[in-house]
Image (cartoon, rainbow, N blue to C red):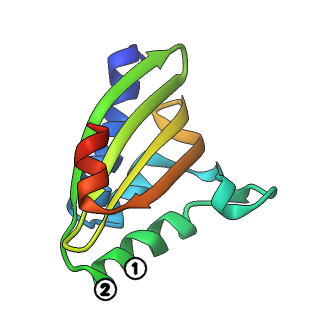
Amino acid sequence: MQPEDNKAIVRRYFLQGLGELNPDVVDEVFSPDHVLSSPDLGTEAVTGSQMIKDAIEGFRRSVGALTCTIQSQIQEGDWVATSYTLSEVQDDHMGIMISRVVDGKIAESHVVAQTVAESQAEAAM
């Protein structure tokens, strides 16, 4: 698989999964045994993709619409780093997701994100 293909897989999750609030994309781009880690989850990683689908459904219920902007993506081997902003009416969520893509699926992700006021998000760009 070419490096640009790995970036496209991760980009599809952000733009279609989050940007279009489409949880069906999760099964298409994440491996069933995906490992997710984040400071928000504590010291234990979560295996599977249900938490990701639940987060998309939560956004759909609470905000109804979300805009996803990919600030930048960098690829090195199997790894893709994505800097992104999720914008809703009230808040922006800025983060970085570092993903390992194996056989065309996201196998592992490390996410660091925070919610910021709209004025803070604009100043950070």
Residue 58, given in percent of the width and then of the height, sits at 40, 79
Circle 2: element type? helix
Judging depth in this view, the residue of 11 and 32 nearest the camera is 11
- For residue 5, above or below residue 66: above
Answer left or right for 82 relative to 40. Answer: left
Dots 2, 1 in contact, CB < 8 A: yes
* 10 Å crowding of disc 1: few (<14), some (14-19), many (20+): few
Judging depth in this view, the residue of 76 and 30 nearest the camera is 76
Answer left or right for 40 relative to 54. Answer: right
Type of residue at label 2? Arg
- For residue 53, above or below residue 26: below
Answer left or right for 70 relative to 33. Answer: left
Q: Residue at x 21, y 79 (%)?
A: 64
Q: Residue at x 19, y 72 (%)?
A: 89
Residue 105, given in percent of the width and then of the height, sits at 49, 39
Q: Residue at x 50, y 52 (%)?
A: 113
- Per the rendering, the mark at residue 21 is none
Type of residue at label 1? Gly
Q: Residue at x 26, y 37 (%)?
A: 125
Residue at the spot of label 1: 58
Cα distance in 3D space between marks 2 and 1: 5 Å
The image quadrant of residue 78 is top right
- Per the rendering, the mark at residue 61 is 2
- For residue 3, above or below residue 32: above
Residue 42, given in percent of the width and then of the height, sits at 76, 61
Residue extending farthest bottom: 61
